[in-house]
Amino acid sequence: MNTTPTDLTVLPHASGLRLMASAGLLVLLAGCATTDSAPQATSPLPERYQAWFEDGQPRNLEWMHKQTVEKADEAAAAGNPREAIRLLTSLTDQGFPQAHYELGKLYDQGEAMERDPARAAEHYARAVRTPSYVRGHAALNLAKLYREGDGVERNDLLAYHLLRLALEEEVDRDERVMLAELLREGGDGVSADPEQAARLYAIEAEQGQEEALRALAEAHAPGGWLDERPERAMDHAQRYAEALQKRAAAGETDAMRRLAGLHAPDGLLGDQPEQRLHWLRQAAEAGDEDALGNAGGALLDAGETRQGIAMLEEAARNGDVDAMTKLGGFLVDRRPGEARQWLTRAAEQGSTDARVHLGRLLIEGEDPRRGVAQLEEAAAQDHPLALASLGDFYMNDELSPSQPFIAVDYLERAHELGHPWATQQLGEAYLRGRGVTADPRRAETLLRQAADQGQSGALGLLGQAYLEGETLPLHPSRGEQLLQAAADAGETSAMTALGEAYLEGPLEARPERGVQLLQQAAQQGDGYAMVVLGRAYRKGEGGLPRDLDKASQWLTRAREAGHDAADEAMTRVNRDRGAQGDIRALIEAAEDGHPGAMADLGRAFLEGQGVQQNREHARNWLTRAANAGHNGARAELGEMLLDSDPERAMTLLRTAADAGNQGARLTLGRAYLEGEHVAADPEQGIAYLRPSAEAGNPYAAQLLGQAYLAGNGVEADPQKAEQWLNRAVESGDLSARASLGRVLLRGENGVPRDGERGRGLLEEAADQGHAGAMATLGREYIRGENLEQDVRQGADYLLKAAEQGHPSARLALAKAYLAANGLENASREQALVWLDGVMEGDSGMALETLHELLSDESAAEALKVAAAD
């Protein structure tokens, strides 16, 4: 039978197979005792090692020194290593290679004395140099030391040649498996050769060697280092399990633990919780303390909390540090006091993981400083989670002032160690420019890397950044896609962000979907989602109906969840309720300290809206609002105080005006123009009015127009006067319409007369109830100078103006009455009393009475005179 190494993977079990495979492999490796033809070596072996592999005359002299070697073994077994070393050294002095090998084992195993791998390597090397029956064994032992860098500098190339020598010498231990492990991935000076590694494993697998079976199962499993072959992978895994079961039946707990691992979520036989737990329990019952803790952890994973905690507690009481750590970590959110005790014990016994759990627990609990100290100790050992947690602590300012530059240093270290949460945090730092210069490209790279590692929060951050369009380019559709992916992964902040975008923009309004996402996030305890819902119902945004009751319900839940923004949002709802007439809600908002609500309540008391009018209460609430920085309240309080405390009033008005309050600017402009409550300063008045007039305020434009008419504070300019008054008219101001109408009708102050337009403006203002326009029209119709005389129509306009309290119209009618009754010398007060009596009666009767008076020529003439005054 002509067998090649390629055929070895499919050979059936047969006696003598190992010998045939070994011979075939030696042919394949080409070079029994030479090193210059090793096919996987990528560099030559250094000259100082060449002599190790040269052929020579074998020196098998064990028959001569057998008794001395046996005595050395007996001395070592009796705990007398010095005697053993003395006896073996006497043989090495005679050039006996077996003695070097025995000394190497003595120093390597460290059973009778302190282990010294460097001395072991020295003696193994001497045994390798001289051909003998122990040469292969020494080569294998020495290869292990060089492969692991144990007592010597790691040297893959030298280990490779030593393993080849062990194969040549047919040691028949684990040289094939070791060489396969080296060739599987390659090493320094040794190229990877997975196919050759598989052939070596196959030889051992045919004999049931456990590590070879495991390696081949991993090789053909999904993501393995050879082509994926699930059936072959499962076949090797099951044979591996059979080999382990034989050892487990003999009571070996190591085999039981390995069988449990085969049934773990990432095990070769797939996730089988019951089988995993079965073998862990078997190991625990066999006295394996680690297995007891692992069984407890498996029970927790399976949802059997009570039994899992019990087993972990038992293991922890037995001193299992890993069990203490698992138990403490599991109890952190459930029973923090107990968790702290177990984690403290585990940390004191050197568990870095426990120290990290303890640090995080203390930071979130009662002792942040001690928690940071625990994390820093773990970080000094490059624990990734400790570094990431410290980055989180120093980046945020919830427990202490943030120190982002320190945070970034920790996060960079954790990211380099591959911790995905640190990668996400670092990406966010580059996105926001915290602790580093903002770098959108670096941020995106890091966040995508974190997302690929399972950090759904990174997807959410990217999605929000694309929606904001500040650091990253605005890309709503991409942002929507990423946020949806994060939401699908259970990220509540992404649900909230996406729901908010559907309600408030920038995405197209989808109120039903937005509310659905926000409610889902709210059910998971996201307080901000509750705030967004409350805010949306308050404003009636995104297609939602305005519903203050629903707004209150959501904001009440947000308050109970402890969200900081809930109180302010609820106050705004109460203020809106107040605007709808719910004075109790307005009082609650004001008492909560909302400046706008305090100002609204002050106005309510000032005007008697919803409450009994009370100027003192109005003043108190407006004062509180003004002190809280509400400029509208400052302006209104200033106007309120003009008659009683002008100095303070002007101070309040100036402060409000400087902050941009238009009402304050108008009040100040008028006051300085007219010299009311302050020394007249027309220029200052114009300075306050002009910006408001230019911004389209009609009253400011009217005052400015009148100033240009009279030349008050500016040089008189009829054209500019007309322009400003026109702007006020165009803005719908009735007073401006009446003023411009009068000026155009009469042609006053240098403005060209335009009787038709003037009358039209006055009639429009009068029709809209402007008393001044009515009075002007009444006078003009009675006088008959600028309008065709019509005394009756003039009297009608005057009466309408008088009914609205216009003073000059009232006085003109009163004088007419006096003249009609020959009482020219009667007091004005008497005449006005008569007029009030007439107007308080039936308005039709008052008009008829007035018309009867006008039928008397003297009364009509008196009315003309009175109207002209």
Image (cartoon, rainbow, N blue to C red):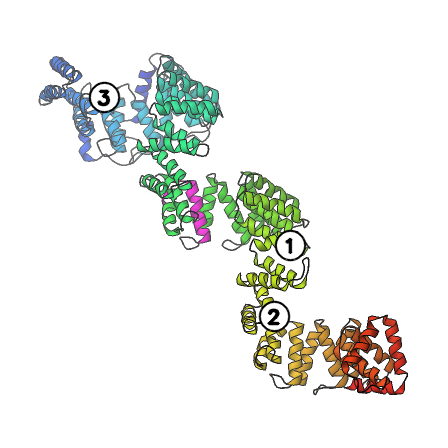
Mark 1 Cα-neighbour bin, 10 Å: few <14, some 14–19, many ≥20: some
> In the rendered structure, which amino acid carries the disc numbered 1?
Asp
Q: Earlier in the sequence, mark 2 or mark 1?
A: 1
Q: Are marks 3 and 1 in contact (CB under 8 Å)?
A: no
Which x, y percent locates residue 796? 84, 77
Badge 1 marks a residue whose secondary structure is helix
Label 2 is placed on what type of residue?
Answer: Glu
What residue is pinned by disc 3? 137
Q: What residue lies at 84% left-to-right and 70% top-to-bottom? A: 841
For mark 2, does the 10 Å Cα neighbourhood hold few (<14), some (14 to 19), or many (20 or more) residues?
many
Quadrant where the C terminus lies?
A: bottom right
Q: CA distance from mark 2 to mark 1?
A: 25 Å
Above or below, 681 relative to 497: below
Between disc 3 and disc 2, the foreground one is: 2
Residues 727 and 263: in front is 727
Where residue 366 sits: x, y (%)? 40, 41
- Where in the figure is residue 728, as x and y percent of width and height? 69, 74
Q: Amino acid at mark 3?
A: His
Magenta residues (range): 413-433
Few, some or many C-alpha atoms within 10 Å of disc 3 (few <14, some 14-19, many ≥20)?
many
Name the residue located 42 percent from the left edge and 53 percent from the top edge: 434
In the image, which disc is placed on residue 639?
2
* Image height of 836 relative to 326, above or below: below
Give the label on residue 576, or none.
Answer: 1
